[in-house]
Every structure is written in structure tokens, then in C-alpha cells.
Image (spheres, rainbow, N blue to C red):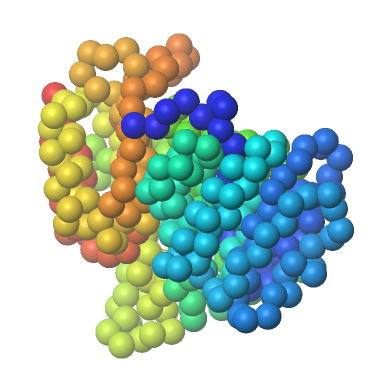
Amino acid sequence: MQSDSTAKVPVTVLTGYLGAGKTTLLNHILTAPHGKRYAVIVNEFGEIGIDHDLIVDVDEEIFELNNGCVCCSVRGDLIRILGALFRRGQTFDGVIIETTGLADPAPVAQTFFADDEIKNRAYLDAVVSVVDAVHIARQIEHSQEAVEQIAFADVIVLNKTDAASPEQLEAAQAIIQRLNRGAKVVSTSRSLVDLDAILDLGAFSLDRAMDLDPHFLPKHHHHDHKDHGHDHGHEHGHDHGHDHHHHDHTHSHYEGIDSLAMRVSAPLSEELFDAWLSELVGSRGLDILRLKGVLRMGDDPRRYIIHGVHMMLEGDYQGPWPVDSAPESRFVLIGRNLADPLVRAEIEAGFRACAA
């Protein structure tokens, strides 16, 4: 269960592929006239740190991690730096972690699930991914990291829209919709965004987990019946490529990630849902990048909010359902090996069977 995060420091993970504009966005955050103080952790790829020198000279605490991805020993360094930062007694309005362009953001998020000291002092606010509108179509063909940076994000900053052709922009938007239909998308140029759109969002907060975009799951995506419009719009692009996928590594990264959004109006049995989710995570946890859900459990007037990273899950009852919306359960999976119609049907049937 997640405790109250009001006294904790929010942490924003800033990710995105090489050259997408992460450091430009970080500089924008640090120099905007918001009056807030941030600690910055830059994760550099390579022995010689450069990113630190690209950050404008501001009155902020800046730390640097070397040697690539935030995982394994580097994740240990992240825990060490955050722990030392909090033990100093200094006050910060937030912490920003800029990952290398070659990093999978999942290990960073897992740090905030797994380490007790970090959990007691900070909370993961959101994963913000910067996407290059000009080059993303090529990047996802050759890089699994580029795919997962989109699939894992809570907010996607679609950058360089001024330099993209109409065809490139349309392709980039289609990629984002395909890989992560639940993410909030902010289109911009030169990484100039309204900071309220990317900071202090509570995307990983249980009581606000689904509030980034309350309309992320349109009514016509209702999973209780066959929706031909959904199948055409979401499946056709994958099936077209999958016909040529046997050993076609050009598209293997993109083909590997999919999302599955489900909705049930009937109340769920908590016991049945827990059993189903345990089985799902036990069998497919390594393939699940993210899961989010707002659930209607039995006769309880409160919303049950759940989110997870791979096999790490947190869930709890939160506030009542909004007075202007009917209670219903919404559940989203983002991960690998979700495109097979039989797999999707099995997962959907399992979720539907949780109805009380």
C-alpha cells in the first residue's frame, strides 16, 4: 500500500531517446520563473560526463551517474545519492532524474517500489518521455529502448513538431497511440512546454493514477463486446507488419510492444480480481511494462486504484467515484506479447470473469 505522499518529495523521471531534447527540457524546467528548487540527477552514458556541462548554470543541486542505464549497480548509486540527499536535511520542491537516451525507465521506477528509505522520503510523480517527431519512426525500428520509453511514459512530450513534415508528425502520433494510448501527449518545439503539464501530476499516486486523461479509454473501446472499429484501428497496423515478422528484425522492436485497454461496468469481486491478477502477473509479469486500473469493487463506494511495474504492484481504496460519472472498472496493460488475438481474448475473458 502506498502511504500519504503529501510530505514526500516528488520525483520526475525524464526519459527519451538520444537527441530527442531531454536536456533542453531540463534546462527549461530549471530556468522557468516558478520559484521552486529542484535536485537534478543526470544519468550519463559513458565514462566521461558531458550532460552536466550542457545544463545551464543555475542554483540547483546536480549529481551525475556514469556508465549508462539506471539499473544494477547504477540503480544502487541512485539509491545512495537520493539517500544522501535526503539525509542532508535540505529542502527541495522536487527531484528530476534525467536518464540516458539508451535507458529503459522501468528500473528507475522500480527503485521507488523496492527501497524502503526512498519510499519513506520520496514518491515517483511521473515518467515523462521526450519523443523526436522527426526521427521516432526510424528509432523504434532499431531500438527497443526507444519503444519502451514511449510505452512506459505517463506523459509524452512530442518535440520538434516545427521541423517535422505532416507525414512525419502523423506517423509519430500514430506510434504513440499504438504503443501507449493512455499517455498524456504534449506537442511542442524546442522542448518548450507548460510545466504544469509535466510536473506535479501524481501519475504514480494511487489516488490520481488515472486522472492524467480521464478520457483515455473511449467508450467504443468497451471490452465487453467485439468492437470492429477498435480492431481495425489498433490491430491492423500490427497484423500488417506481423505477416512479415518471422525474422524481420527491422520491425521487431515495434512489433513487440502493445497495449490492452479494458472496461467492465459490473462491480468486481475483490477476491476474484486478486486471484486473476496474481495469476496474470505470475505468468506474464516480465512482459508487463506498466499496468493501471481504476476499479469498482463490489458495493464499496470508493474507487480501488492499482498500478504496477513488471511484477511490482501497489493498490488501495481511495476517494469516492466522481458524482458526474457512473462507477465502472477500467484497466490498462502495456507490455510485450499482447498482440496475439488469443492472448488478448484470454486476458479480457479473465478480467470480465472477475465481475461479482
The residue at 42%/79% (across/down) is 251
Q: Position of residue 107 (x, y in %)?
A: 43, 59
| Count of labels in the image | 0
Say whether residue 293 is visible: yes
Looking at the image, residue 45 sits to the left or right of residue 161; the answer is left
The one of 28 and 237 positioned closer to us in this rendering: 28
Q: In the figure, 73 relative to 63: above or below? A: below
Q: Which of the 4 image quadrants contains residue 224?
A: top left
The residue at 60%/76% (across/down) is 45
Say whether residue 151 is visible: no
The one of 302 and 165 positioned closer to us in this rendering: 302
Q: Position of residue 27 (x, y in %)?
A: 79, 56
Residue reaching furthest to the front: 88
Q: Position of residue 300 (x, y in %)?
A: 26, 14
Q: In the figure, 222 relative to 317: above or below? A: below
Q: Which of the 4 image quadrants contains residue 55?
A: bottom right
Q: Position of residue 83 (x, y in %)?
A: 54, 48
Q: In the figure, 108 relative to 329: above or below? A: below
The one of 310 and 165 positioned closer to us in this rendering: 310
The residue at 32%/75% (across/down) is 242
Looking at the image, residue 47 sits to the left or right of residue 248; the answer is right
Q: Specify the quadrant that holds the N terminus.
A: top left
Q: Specify the quadrant that holds the C terminus.
A: top left
The residue at 25%/45% (across/down) is 226
Q: Which of the 4 image quadrants contains residue 32?
A: top right
